[in-house]
Amino acid sequence: MQIETLDLRTITVADALEIAELLVRVWPNSEKTVAVRQRQLIELGQKYDRDEEPAPQSFLIRESGQLIAHSAVLPRSIGTSAGDLVIAGLTRVCTSPDQRGR
């Protein structure tokens, strides 16, 4: 099993496609096609306009070269009584249906 971390600011079209295909298998939705989800992933990184860390990240788990799980962490700024605070938002957490229960 191999774990990879991708900076979404520099995600490749091929990586975005592979993640999008997994997302569509896990959450089929006629409006969110593979192409739509691929574009969303690419745009998420392109639209991130802060130079400082943390940047949006995707975490991939592969087995025998196949993508079997994914999650993403997106930085979010929230207002608190002590001022703004950057938190991590966990999103797009999924496991390939054929890998569940192992």
Image (cartoon, rainbow, N blue to C red):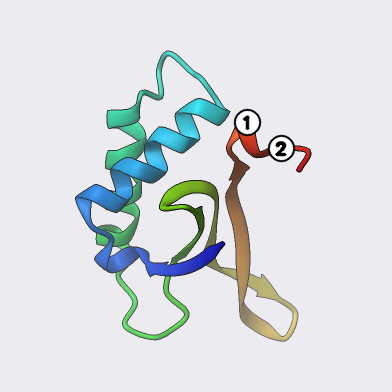
Q: Which residue lies at the image location 49% right of the left edge and 18% below the top edge?
A: 29
Q: Amino acid at mark 2?
A: Arg
Direction front: furthest residue: 64
Picture quarter with the C terminus = top right
- List x then y, in percent, for residue 6: 39, 67
- List x then y, in percent, for residue 28: 51, 20
- List x then y, in percent, for residue 53: 43, 84
As rendered, which of 75 and 64 lies closer to the eye? 64
Picture quarter with the N terminus = bottom right
Direction top: furthest residue: 30
As rendered, which of 1 and 47 lies closer to the eye? 1
Q: Is residue 55 left or right of residue 74?
A: left
Q: Which residue lies at the image location 35% right of the left edge and 63% below the top edge?
A: 8
Please determine whether, in this image, residue 98 is positioned above or below residue 75. above
Q: Which residue lies at the image location 46% right of the left edge and 48% below the top edge?
A: 67
Residue 97 shows which numbered tag? 1
Q: Amino acid at mark 1?
A: Pro
* SS state under label 1: helix
Residue 100 shows which numbered tag? 2
Q: CA distance from mark 1 to mark 2?
A: 6 Å
Please determine whether, in this image, residue 84 is positioned above or below residue 44. below
